[in-house]
Amino acid sequence: MNKIQSIRNLLLTISLTIGIDVLAGDNAPANADKNIWKDDDTMKELVKDIDNGKDDDDDDMDWDEFKDSKIYKLEDKETKECVEGRAELGNSLADYEILRCFEDSDYYEEEY
């Protein structure tokens, strides 16, 4: 095998490896498995993390998973109603809505 064939084979091998890695890699959206509340024990901790930018912006939180979380279940009735109202209003839930509901449970009634 001459040098040119060796280089072609090397480039082909690298290309195939990269291609297979891309195809076999995680093609799910970046936040599909990510729950921004997973490292927090209370709504207060979650809100602090959101406010301080510790958690990446999540404008499409999984409402079904969040409402089943211990953080949501432990929160007071007014805040839960606010969060649920915001989730239903836009058919999704954003992290800033949790922050706003925690600060003011009447936020769910506000109009844009």
Image (cartoon, grey):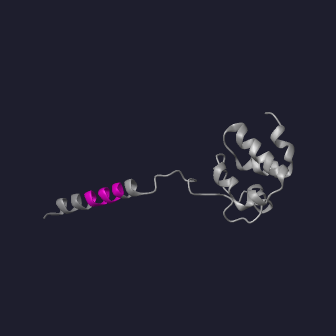
Q: Quadrant of residue 71?
A: bottom right
Q: Is the residue 34 above or below the residue 96 in the image? A: below
- Residue 52 at least partly seen: no
Instruction: Name the one closer to the observer, 67 or 23.
Output: 67
Is 95 placed left or right of 82 in the picture? left
Residue 19 is a magenta residue: yes
Lateral position of residue 101 relative to residue 57, left or right: right
Of residue 22 and residue 15, the one placed in the foreground of this image is 22
3 relative to 68 in the view: left or right: left
Q: Quadrant of the N terminus?
A: bottom left
In the image as oriented, which residue stretches furthest toward the left? 1
How far across and down, in percent of the image, does residue 49 sit?
74, 60
* Coordinates of residue 97 in the picture (x, y in percent): 76, 46
Q: 18 or 108, which is in the foreground? A: 108
Please state the extent of the stretch shown in magenta in the rendering: 11-20
Q: Quadrant of the C terminus?
A: top right
